[in-house]
Amino acid sequence: MLSQVEDAVIAADTDERLTYMNRAAERLYAVPSGEALGRPIPELFTTEWLRPDDEEAAKNALRSSGTWRGVVSHRKRDGEVISVDETLSTLTDDSGQVTGTLYSLRDVTGQRRAELELWIKDMAIASALEGISLSDYDGKIIYANRASLAIHGWEEEEIVGQHVSVLWGDLGGEMNQIREELVRNGAWSGEVKSRRKDGSTFPPMQLVLSVVTDEAGRRICTMGSGGIDITERKQAEQELRIRDMAIASSLSAFTVADLDGRLIYVNRAFLSMWGYDSPTEVIGKRVTELWQNEEEARNTFENVVRTGRHIGERIGRRRDKTTFYAMFSGSLVRDGDGVPLCITASLTDITGQKQAEANIQAHNRELSVLNRIIGGVSTSATDLEEALGRVLAAVLSLLDLSGGGIYLIEPGGRERARLVCVQGLPEGFPSQPCIPDITARPYVEVLVAGNPLFFDDHPDLRYPGGEEEGTLHQSASIPITAHGRVIGGALNVVSGNGNQFTDADRSLLTAIGREIGTSVERTLLIRQLETAEQEANLYSTFSATISGTPRTSRASTPISSSTCSKGGKEETTHRNSRTVSAKASKSCGTSRPSAGSTRNRPCSRR
């Protein structure tokens, strides 16, 4: 019997799997029952509820009364959306246990479309700027739109039943002529004076009268349109124009999308921000295509539809595939009855702000690291190699680097450098105790020209050493400079976990090289002053010996008794100089020590 009815009928068990499907349902959803039976209902169609509370209301009705009826939308397998008058009934067994649900479905898409068209027409008349009224055969008003009520100063319940003559000035005998022409031609137009409820009138306005008939040509009523209050219309037009120009010329991007997530309007700022030339290039696009993460964009759009609003930072994707940061503010727009109409979004490019924040963070990090580095150098100004050891340890720790070393150029104009400190170099990274010729590549770029060298920028350039020429590690060589010239040597570091150096890392390492250079320069000046003081003391002692007049040193202590017997600083300084010189000669000799002899050598005073 169910197979003969015109309405589509399906049945499903408690797991929503199809157990029955009549021929009308097969035609409606274009699926044979043999293919559909046993499958979940969502594979046949998905239900889209017209209002947020409808689904819960249907469940409550089924639990309480066992039946529910309402209009829903079904999205079929091919994507087509139809309007369905749906009646749900609970199926039970002999014991009253629920066994499933019976669906009675009627396609009302055409009816809903017709109702929508009528509603649109009704809304168009109701919201028209010109006054519109309807009157019956006797001239009594049966309807007046909002504009007509506002123009004439009436309330709807007051105007209905009044004769149309209350809306217009004294027409006298002209009223009969208007009526005759209206009957003869079905329409009349001309200028008449409008009258307000309080009896006052205002200048003549254009009035158009027309006879409204049914499909058989029978007269239903008379419609009068016109009587526009020019003052209010001009003001409304100006307000609309101002709003439109404000949106169109706003520095913030502005978009409108339909409820399916497709763009229907964009302003000039949007075109500029996303790199398009004309609105026609983007109208109809899905809003998800505007963002780098389309899945996240889809979730955001659904959140706006669900909650009515969403604000947050997003990464936009321009027409040329480049990206930028944007602040997104989306809102759901509803009509007077609360029905969703569209989604509007205001968007601001905050790339500059984000970059400024990143720069501030990088600058603060740089200051913090440099303060640590300065502290490490300053604590032992004259014990240079020990201070450099602390500096290297601090750099590796603060920047999370794998390892590194510091080379110092030998004094006296020699074109070679020795490794004074090394720590944590990874396996496979060559560690040379001596660079015999700093004018050779790649050393000349750093130790002579004073330019930082990041090897991930030069895949063809490798450090010599080891069994194979070069290294696969991401490394950098930073000149130790002061006042724009190489003052000491180079700081060599290897990045952690093989990561490339970021722009912030490069800037910071270059600044560290300058700070080390300033400290090295200061230390060398202190050493020069100490040497000059020692020479002056020796000269004073020698002069006193020759003249027979005892003389004391500038520090009021004879060097022979103070530095030798007490192991003073001058003696220590000379001893350190001799040790450094001896080790430099040994390390930079004709025979080169193996790489393993210096790898991970502790950064201690020589």
Image (cartoon, rainbow, N blue to C red):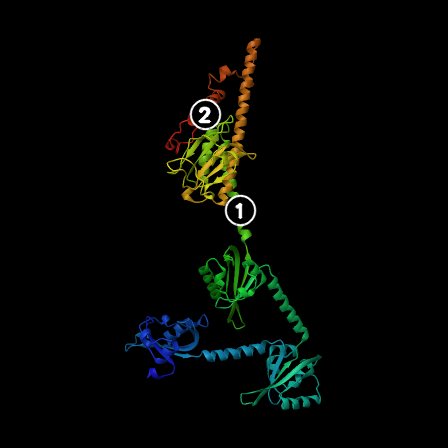
Answer above or below: position of 10 versus 532. Answer: below
Q: Does 294 sit left or right of 250 as displayed? A: left
Residue at screen point 68% across, 90% down: 177
Name which of mark 2 and mark 1 comes first in the sequence: 1
Q: How many marks?
A: 2
Is mark 2 in CB contact (under 8 Å) with mark 1? no
Neighbour class for label 2 at 10 Å: few (<14), some, many (≥20)?
some
Query: What residue occupies the far top of the structure in this picture?
Result: 548
User: Residue 141: percent from the left, percent from the top?
Assistant: 61, 85
Q: Secondary structure at mark 2?
A: helix
Neighbour class for label 1 at 10 Å: few (<14), some, many (≥20)?
few
Q: Is residue 129 visible?
A: yes
Label 1, on which residue? 359
Q: Secondary structure at mark 1?
A: helix
Answer above or below: position of 456 versus 30. Answer: above
User: Residue 32: percent from the left, percent from the top?
Assistant: 34, 76
User: Residue 599: percent from the left, percent from the top?
Assistant: 39, 33
Q: Does 257 sit left or right of 462 as displayed? A: right
Answer above or below: position of 449 versus 226. Answer: above
- Quarter assignment of residue 213: bottom right
Front residue (pair 35, 196): 35
Front residue (pair 459, 57): 459
Amino acid type, mark 1: Asn
User: Residue 87: percent from the left, percent from the top?
Assistant: 39, 78
Front residue (pair 34, 219): 34
Amino acid type, mark 2: Val
Label 2, on which residue? 580
Residue at screen point 49% across, 18% down: 563
